[in-house]
Amino acid sequence: MFRGANDLLGVIHAGDPRLHGVKPGALREALGIATQSISALKTAIETRNASKVPKPDAAQQDYGVPREKDDVPELTGRLIRANQSVLGLSDALLAASAGRQYLSTALFAAELVESFQQLTGKGNAGLTDGEAVSRVVAFKLAPEIALIPGFNGGVAQQWWKDGHPDYVTDNSQNDQSSDGNGAGVMFLLFLTDYLGIAMDEILARMPDSKGNGAPLGDTYVNLVKAHSELAQVAGKDGKTAFQKMIQLLQENSLNPDGSLNLPANGNPFPSMQGAKQGGLFAGGASPVASNGTVAQDAQAAIQLETQVEQQVAALKAVLQQIRGDATGNPPASLAREEERPALVAGLVDGAVSYKPPLVGSVTTRLAQQVAAFRAPHYDQDLQTKFWPHVYNELSGTGPNKDRLQVITGTNQTPLTVQITGTLAKTPNPEKDGDLHISFLPDDPHFPTNQNPQEPRLEIEIIYSSAAVQLDAQPAEVGYKNPFDTSQLVAGTRIQAAGPLIYDRAHGVVDASGNVMYGLEIHPLVGMTVLTKGGGPPPPPPPDGTAQLSSDLDSALAQAGTLVQTLQNLTSLIQKMKGEAPANMKRK
């Protein structure tokens, strides 16, 4: 059953039954929520802070506002791509925080809270008051659960879009109501993270309703009796407190389109002026280990340090290229690039032979390495919308077969992986229409090419331009490139999804079975730009030094990315120092 725009945040393929009969207005509303979530998640990934509020207009800058004339198929396609990006970014943020292991803990805590509500008679797990309490306790115990799409920020956005009705003094909504859950969760976060009341005291002040539930506004009235100073900030009753919360959101958390500008964890209150932190327990006591955050941040620091190493290596490669430009002696890898078979002539009879495929032991090892990077929410689109248009693979796509050896899945049923990283240089289209992207993965565990003079990993966007290569033209029929490639310049950070393959047309393997060149994500099926790199390359200078100028621009962009990564690493270590227990700090 369709339950509003928030319910559409789970749609990741065109066959989802929730799309049956859906109206354009609901699709536009859901797309607005999804794009706001993308902006928040991108901000959290780049700043290592899920509480960081994105710029108010970030969603509009990156994704635009749905137009009234957009039809259902266009809106559906955009929403599916946005939902896929939300899932991928959530995965990346959870992996970076080492938080996935705590998700089951949070869900268990939420269910346990609801069981105690039934035992104590305080709150009703089937109504707004009980559901809101179980969610917020879960957020506090394991903040990663708040990052799950639609679990926190999504319901808050739905509630706000629906006119932010007062389900704080009205407890009539059940636990499946987006508006009830949005209002209840936001009000409890307002009590804890703006007014500074600890959750254990909030629970103690909930009315004993004999299991029937009671409005959260009644809980606020009980809190005022114990803390008279609250009346000066938020009024004496639940209705005035609710209106104070609405006022704060209007003054601090609005996007230009009227939606809420929320951080990735959905909680805007800690960043507001005058906010007080209540936490879980009065007096700051907590059974949660104090060194958990430091340990997670240490892991993040190691990942940042790996990024620095990769970016230094990329910068070194570009500087070597610049030396080649200046001396007229390009690196050997570039010379070989020019010698790659064009596959343009002599295709009438299809007489083209590719290099041998990787042996089974190598493909098994590579498949095991990328298992942790699986992104199944892209599989259906890969198999139905993209793979049939990869030339020389399936029947009717060209005169030759098995050009690419699929590592994730099979050539009949390829599967998707997803990885974040940085573009090493501005890509250029090839004769087959594909755009070749030289890519530096963030995670050192993702398999890459071993030749230091080659791209660590290549990503290919198929048919970013019209193919002039003869055997590539049949597969182009009926395909439309969905990706905006104008932002893909050196230094740009993206999250990319697609199958991991070995390109037999020009792959190279050494005697030990190590892939020196030929590992690719091909074709790209999902892309989210995290941070933008330098501007587009300048037009070629009249003196013929276009390549040198382009490579210098690439080196500057990579140097800027390296500086930003070092700054992030410095900030993270400073944060770790502040979080470390007293006995761990240097005297």
Image (cartoon, rainbow, N blue to C red):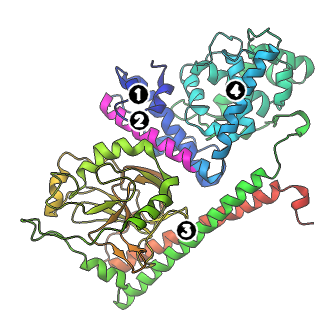
| Residue type at numbered disc 3 | Gly
| Residue type at numbered disc 4 | Glu
Identify the mark nearer the N-term, 4 or 2: 2
In this picture, which residue range is highlighted in magenta? 70-92
Q: Quadrant of the N terminus?
A: top left
Which element is circle 4 on? helix
Disc 4: CA contacts within 10 A as few (<14), some (14-19) or many (>=20): some
| Residue type at numbered disc 2 | Leu
Residue 518: image location, x then y, percent: 35, 69
Q: Is residue 86 magenta?
A: yes
Identify the mark nearer the N-term, 4 or 1: 1
The residue at which mark 1 appears reads as: 27
The residue at which mark 3 appears reads as: 560
Identify the mark nearer the N-term, 1 or 2: 1
The residue at which mark 2 appears reads as: 79
Residue 9: image location, x then y, percent: 48, 32
Q: Residue at x 21, y 65 (%)?
A: 431
Quarter of the image for residue 324 reads: bottom left
Residue 358: image location, x then y, percent: 35, 68
Q: Residue at x 64, y 37 (%)?
A: 146
Task: Name the mark on residue 111.
Answer: 4
